[in-house]
C-alpha cells in the first residue's frame, strides 16, 4: 500500500507568512479606513525593463509562426544564454564552461533540488538566520529526526549562528559537516561575506571534502568593490562549491522565473571523481525538468546585453535608494539597523528588548507598517525584524513618514 512521506510532518514551517497575513487581515478588518504599508515583502514591484520586454515580445511573435516556432529546448538551458552567463562570469575573471551552467526556473528551485545529489546521511550546516528553503527541503529529505520548538531548531543540523558580534556571518563549524549552505548577501540580514570569510569556508570544505552550496541571488546589489559577488572569486572554490543565482532580484524576474546553477567539473566530494557531480546534475535536470520557458530565457539573454545590464543596474539603484530612505528614517529614531547598503534587506534590532512578534505588532498597530519578524528565519532572528526595500517609492515614503510620526519607542 502507499504510505506518506512522514518527513513532511516534521516541518514546523507554514507559520511565518500565514501568521503575518492573519494579523494584517485582522487589523485591516478592524480598521478598514487605514492603509497598510508592506515593507516586509521580498518581491520586486517595478516594471520589467524595455530591452527585456522587447526580447520577450519578439520571442512570442516567433512562436506565432510555424517557421520560427520552437518547442522543447535544451533541458540544461538555451546554449546562447549559458554562454552569455559564462561571459558574464569572465568579466570577474571567473572561468566557467557553458556545460557547467544549468538554467532553471529560479534559485529557490535549485536550492531545493540540489541536495538530491547528496546522500541523506550527510550532515548539513545552515546559517541562522536563513532563508527557510535550505532547512525545509533537507527536513523533507530525511536529514533531521525532529524539531525542537523551544530552541526553534531541527535535530542533526549544525546551525551557523549569525549575530551582531560576528557581523551576522559565522565562522566555519568546529565539527565535521558535509553540506554547507551560505547566502551572501544574506536573506534576511543583508550581511555580505568578505573574501577572507569565504576563504575560511573554502579551506574548511576542501579539508573536510564538504560541499558549499552558495546562494548568490542578491549579488548584483553589492556595490562595494572589495566584497565578492561569487564564491568562485575565492581560490579553491571550483573544487568544493556549487553556486546558485537568479534573475529574480537582478532584473525583476520574480514572476518571469529564470535562474541558474553552476556545478564545476572540478567539484568533488569524498566518494566522487571530477565531473561526476556535474554529470549527475545534468542527468537530474534532463530527467526531472523540461527547461525554463523559452520566452523567459529570451528575456534573460537580453538582461545580459550591454543595454540590459545598464537597465538592470538602474533598477537595482532604485531599490537601493529605497533602502537608503528606510535606513535613514529608522536611524533618526535611534533604531539599530544592519544591511541595506549592499543588499535590499535591512535587519533591524527591536527596541526595548521586544521579541520579533511584539515589535511587528507595534509597527502594525501604531504605524500601519508590516515588517517580517526575524524569528521566522531562525532562532538567531529573535529580537529583529526584516525590512525590504522592494516597493514603489511613493509607498516607501509614506511608510517611513508614518513610522517617524507614529512609532513610540
Image (cartoon, rainbow, N blue to C red):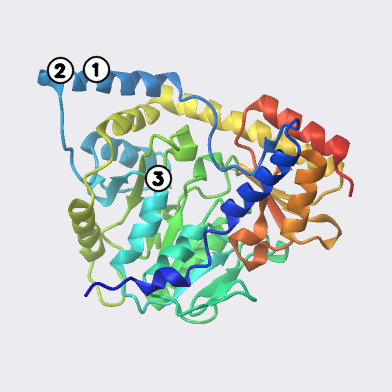
Residue 340 appears in view: no
Residue topped by disc 2? 65
Horizontal and vertical percent position of residue 195: 54, 57
Residue topped by disc 1? 61
Are the residues flagged by discs 2 and 1 in contact, CB closer than 8 Å? yes
> Which of 48 and 301 lies nearest the eye of the viewer?
48
Q: Secondary structure at mark 1?
A: helix
Residue drawn at the location 35% of the way across and 18% of the way down: 54
Residue drawn at the location 74% of the way across and 34% of the way down: 399
Crowd band around label 3 with a 10 angstrom C-alpha radius: few (<14), some (14–19), many (20+): few
Horizontal and vertical percent position of residue 381: 66, 62
Separation (CA) of disc 2 from disc 1: 7 Å
Vertical relation: 105 (above or below) 138 = above
Label drawn at residue 93: 3
Q: Secondary structure at mark 3?
A: loop
Vertical relation: 113 (above or below) 39 = below
Amino acid at each position: 500500500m502507499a504510505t506518506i512521506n512522514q518527513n513532511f510532518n516534521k516541518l514546523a514551517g507554514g507559520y511565518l507568512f500565514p501568521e503575518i497575513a492573519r494579523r494584517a487581515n485582522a487589523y485591516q478588518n478592524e480598521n478598514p479606513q487605514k492603509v497598510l504599508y508592506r515593507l516586509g515583502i521580498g518581491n520586486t514591484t517595478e516594471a520589467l525593463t524595455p530591452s527585456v520586454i522587447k526580447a520577450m515580445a519578439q520571442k512570442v511573435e516567433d512562436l506565432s509562426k510555424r517557421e520560427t516556432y520552437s518547442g522543447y529546448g535544451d533541458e540544461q538551458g538555451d546554449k546562447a544564454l549559458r554562454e552569455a552567463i559564462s561571459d558574464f562570469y569572465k568579466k570577474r575573471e571567473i572561468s566557467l564552461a557553458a556545460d557547467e551552467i544549468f538554467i532553471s526556473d529560479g534559485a529557490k528551485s535549485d536550492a531545493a533540488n540540489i541536495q538530491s545529489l547528496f546522500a541523506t546521511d550527510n550532515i548539513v550546516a545552515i546559517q541562522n538566520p536563513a532563508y527557510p528553503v535550505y532547512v525545509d527541503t533537507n527536513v523533507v529529505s530525511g536529514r533531521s529526526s525532529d524539531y525542537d520548538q523551544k530552541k526553534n531548531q531541527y535535530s542533526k543540523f549544525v546551525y551557523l549562528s549569525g549575530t551582531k558580534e560576528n557581523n551576522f556571518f559565522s565562522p566555519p563549524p568546529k565539527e565535521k559537516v558535509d553540506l554547507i549552505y551560505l547566502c551572501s548577501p544574506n536573506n534576511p540580514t543583508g550581511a555580505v561575506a568578505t573574501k577572507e570569510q569565504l576563504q575560511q569556508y573554502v579551506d574548511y570544505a576542501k579539508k573536510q571534502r564538504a560541499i558549499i552550496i552558495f546562494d548568490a541571488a542578491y549579488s548584483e546589489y553589492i556595490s562595494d568593490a572589495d566584497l565578492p559577488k561569487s564564491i568562485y572569486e575565492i581560490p579553491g572554490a571550483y573544487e568544493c562549491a556549487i553556486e546558485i543565482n537568479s534573475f529574480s532580484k537582478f532584473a525583476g524576474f520574480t514572476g518571469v522565473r529564470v535562474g541558474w546553477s553552476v556545478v564545476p567539473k572540478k567539484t568533488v566530494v569524498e566518494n566522487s571523481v571530477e565531473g561526476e557531480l556535474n554529470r549527475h546534475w545534468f542527468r537530474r535536470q534532463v530527467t526531472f525538468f523540461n527547461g525554463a520557458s523559452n520566452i523567459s530565457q529570451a528575456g534573460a539573454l537580453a538582461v545580459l546585453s550591454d543595454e540590459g545590464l545598464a537597465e538592470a543596474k538602474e533598477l537595482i539603484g532604485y531599490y537601493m535608494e529605497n533602502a537608503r530612505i528606510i535606513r535613514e528614517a529608522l536611524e533618526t529614531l535611534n533604531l539599530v539597523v544592519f544591511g541595506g547598503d549592499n543588499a535590499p534587506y535591512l535587519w533591524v534590532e527591536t527596541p526595548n528588548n521586544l521579541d520579533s512578534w511584539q515589535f511587528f505588532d507595534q509597527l502594525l498597530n501604531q504605524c500601519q507598517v508590516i515588517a517580517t519578524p526575524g524569528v521566522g528565519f531562525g532562532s538567531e532572528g529573535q529580537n529583529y525584524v526584516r525590512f525590504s526595500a522592494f516597493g514603489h517609492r511613493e509607498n516607501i515614503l509614506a511608510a517611513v513618514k508614518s513610522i517617524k510620526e507614529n512609532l513610540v519607542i
